[in-house]
Amino acid sequence: MTVEPMCTRCFGVLSPDDVVEADGTGVAHIDCRRPRDLTHDERSLLYGYCWAHPIGCPECGRGFRLFELGATYYKRTCCPHCGFDLIERVRDHLYTCPLSPEVMRRRVREARETAGKLVKQAREFPDRADVLMREAEVAATALRDAMKESATEGWRRIIQAKLRDGRLPHDNIPATIPGSPDDGSACGVCERPLANHEAMKLIDCGASAIPLHTDCFELWNEERHNFKSTA
């Protein structure tokens, strides 16, 4: 009898198309709310190399740039005109775009395929799940090390854009910003949810506060000073 692997966080059945990661002795969605969203590494490729590239919507026939994709957390791969989900079309672009390094495109694709195999093999061979997860973690670590430098530059460009349009503040910031436990919110820089093992920084904006991953906070803090000095 085939055992259906379940996410250790939301307890939903895992699909080979889901974006997953190792979680203790099990497998979990990276984001249970959008289990088939772009992976973090795919987003690094998008922000690092393809941010301004054109794309067309097969539903409404209109064209736009990738940076015009829905800005909200739940619509961030949707057509800005009709709301059609373009995630597979965006993936096709990321995996074939000749303007990004071929070796990175291949590694990002392999990392996603490895995650799919992890779910499939966890279903067929549950007694080997721990070995498979360790293999997946090694592959993911190697990929992230290779992409770290280009991804950082991509996040800087995103922060600069958000500083310009006011989505991130650049002045009247308290001298001390303490860290705090995560609350499941989406980071104001990368829009990924703050996982239960991560600390966050809360940027006080008066009536509201913007949560940031600590790495994203450091990049934002550097860029806001540069922005302030050139504004």
Image (spheres, helix red, strand yellow):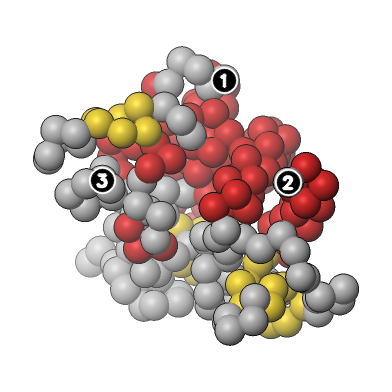
Residue 41 rendering spot, x and y as whole percentages: 54, 43
Amino acid under label 2? Answer: Ala
Label 3, on which residue?
A: 79
212 in relation to 78, above or below: below
Label 1, on which residue?
A: 101
Residue at x 50% of width, y 26% of height: 106
Residue 136 is at least partly visible in this image: no
Q: Quadrant of residue 123?
A: bottom left
Most distant residue in the top direction: 98
Give SS at disc 1: loop
| Dot 1 or dot 2, earlier in sequence | 1
Residue 159 is at least partly visible in this image: yes
Amino acid under label 3? Answer: Cys
Give SS at disc 3: loop
Q: Say whether marks 3 and 2 touch (CB < 8 Å).
A: no
| Dot 1 or dot 3, earlier in sequence | 3
Residue 210 lies left or right of residue 128; in this view the side is: right
Q: For mark 2, does the 10 Å Cα neighbourhood hold few (<14), some (14 to 19), or many (20 or more) residues? A: few
C-alpha separation, residue under disc 3 versus residue under disc 2: 32 Å
Circle nearer the viewer, 3 or 2: 2
Circle nearer the viewer, 1 or 2: 2
Give SS at disc 2: loop
Count of numbered circles on the image: 3
Amino acid under label 1? Answer: Pro
| Dot 3 or dot 2, earlier in sequence | 3
Residue 128 rendering spot, x and y as whole percentages: 49, 58
Quarter holding the N terminus?
A: bottom left
C-alpha separation, residue under disc 1 versus residue under disc 2: 33 Å
Disc assigned to residue 231: 2
